[in-house]
Amino acid sequence: MPDEFDTELGGFFECARQPLDGNAFLAETLRKIDRARHARLRRRLIAAVILVAAVASAFPAVLPGAAVLVRGAGEYSLAAAEFSTTPLGWALTAAIGVWVLLRARAPGRS
């Protein structure tokens, strides 16, 4: 009886010693990763287009309110209003906006 098990076990080991077709598995896995990466990029692009379209469509509705706020700020501080309309004021405002966005980023994300 022990010889019977040994020959059967030996047959299993012989089958296990044959080389696996790892290249096909690796190629398929890389193809899946590439497809997922492209799908993620497409989703991001579609989201960006939708966001730009939403902002562009909302711009006419927001513009009068923004004009009132700028006018009010200008009346409150004439010097700040004049500075905010210069290229240096725009650059400073953009830098402050970037700083706020970077500070508001979720913790742990890079």
Image (cartoon, rainbow, N blue to C red):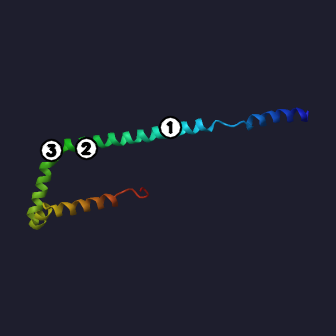
Task: Measure the alpha-carbon separation of dots 1 and 2.
Answer: 30 Å
Q: Name the quarter where the C terminus is drawn.
A: bottom left
C-alpha gap between disc 3 and disc 2: 14 Å
| Image position, residue 29 (x, y; %) | 54, 39
Q: Position of residue 83 (x, y in %)?
A: 13, 65
Classify mark 3: helix, strand or loop: helix
Report the front residue among 31 and 55. Answer: 31
Instruction: State the residue at coordinates (28%, 40%).
Output: 50
What residue is disc 3 on?
A: 60
- Element assignment for label 2: helix
Secondary structure state at the residue bearing disc 1: helix
Marks 1 and 3, how far apart in space?
44 Å
Q: Is residue 91 left or right of residue 43?
A: left
Residue, disc 2: 52
| Left or right: residue 5 compared with residue 75 | right
Q: Tags 3 and 2 in contact by the CB under 8 Å rule?
A: no
Q: Amino acid type of disc 3? A: Pro
Mark 1, residues whose alpha carbon is within 10 Å: few (<14), some, or many (≥20)? few
Residue 46 vertical placement versus 90 (above, below): above
Residue on which the image places disc 1:
32
Tell me the amino acid under the disc marked 1.
Lys
Residue 73 falls in which quadrant of the image? bottom left
At horizontal 11% and vertical 54% (from top left) the residue drawn is 68
Q: How many marks?
A: 3
Q: If the image is split into quadrants, where does the N terminus sit?
A: top right
Q: Earlier in the sequence, mark 1 or mark 3?
A: 1
Residue 99 horizontal side relative to residue 4, left or right: left
Residue at (72%, 36%) from the top-left corner? Answer: 18
- The picture quadrant where one finds residue 47 is top left
If you read the primary sequence from the N terminus, does the residue marked by circle 3 or circle 2 appear first? 2
Residue 30: % across, % down = 52, 40
Q: Which amino acid, mark 2?
A: Val
